[in-house]
Amino acid sequence: MSCIGFWIRGHETFDSSLYLHPMKILAGNWKMNTLPEEGLALLDALVLGLSPERLGEVRIVVAPPMVQLSQAVERLWNVPEISVAAQTCHQQSMGAFTGEISAPMLRALDVDAVIIGHSERRNYFNETDADCAEKIRSCLNHELSPIFCVGETHQERQSGRAWEVVKNQLQTGLSQVSSEEIVDVVIAYEPVWAIGTGEVATPEQAQEMHGAIRQWLREKYHASAQNVPLLYGGSCKPSNAAELFALPDVDGGLIGGASLVAHDFLALLDALRES
Ligand code: PEP
């Protein structure tokens, strides 16, 4: 499997060797928002606002609630420029795990990617880095691109441990990913203190962390690491996106609140395309 992240519905997959730079990705995490009709209206508004010129080289990803994945895939069937992601999955393929959804189930729905290790999953549902490693393994086994979230808390940053925390998350979370597979992984740096708070990382903080992640990937995976897209997430909105997306090691964004407003999400697309 080799597509810099994404299997394209009904199309040949990308050949990552064609790309010298990471793909630009704008991903919207809708979290537990939108009823089915609202989800469809949001998708329609995005599609209406898209044109090849507006898209440029950016790949868009939307992550609706689980129960809306089918309708999203169906609505976007002829819009291969927009990939569909789940917000989590279970690490096992099947079994007695009441309420859970597995990677092969998502793949059977033609979902393209899965957000793994979002800080809300870590905080509220006790997901550990070891769980993330198994979930990422399961995604790769089933042709789904993991969007792996890492990031430190406010306290960890205050105590000077931000990189140590993120490095440990990377080390454990990616422990089962080979050099061939790393190009199918997307990494999102999401400082926990910036998610949904309105507080955004400064360009210096974001670049320092993204640069460190890139360097770590280079040391572990050598040449293949250059194609791993690194997304920033945490209160990214049209008013602050341009300076974040312009940073050398920021290849896009994982967007929460602003992804629920088509106008804002499209403005973020403009900022990323022009970065
Ligand atoms: C997120 O939940 O991944 C996120 C970045 O949220 P927000 O953009 O609302 O801070």
Image: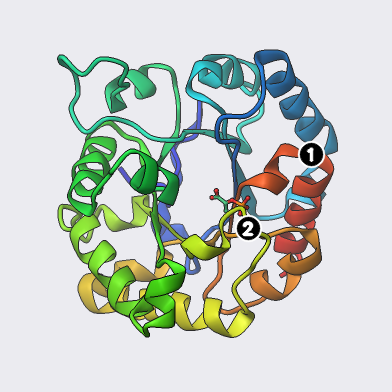
Mark 1 residue type:
Ala
Q: Residue at x 53, y 26 (%)?
A: 65
Q: Give the alpha-carbon distance from disc 2 to disc 1, as whole Å.
A: 20 Å
- Give the residue type at disc 2: Thr
Residue shown at 63% from the left, 29% from the top: 33
Residue located beneath label 1 in the image? 262
User: What residue is drawn where x is 59% and y is 14%?
Assistant: 71
- Respond yes or no on whether mark 2 lies under 8 Å from ligand 1: yes
First in sequence: mark 2 vs mark 1 = 2
Q: Which residue is mark 2?
A: 197
Q: Is residue 237 above or below residue 79?
A: below
Tag 2's secondary structure?
loop
Does residue 262 appear left or right of residue 66 in this picture?
Answer: right
**Residue nearest the viewer, comparing 59 with 195:** 195
Residue 185, x across and y down, in percent: 36, 52
Give the position of the C terminus as an image quadrant.
Answer: bottom right
In front: 145, or 206? Answer: 206
Left/right placement of residue 151 relative to residue 257 reads left
Residue at 65 percent of width and 72 percent of height: 244
Residue 99 image position (x, y, % from top left)? 32, 16
Q: Quadrant of residue 38?
A: top right
Quadrant hosting residue 37:
top right
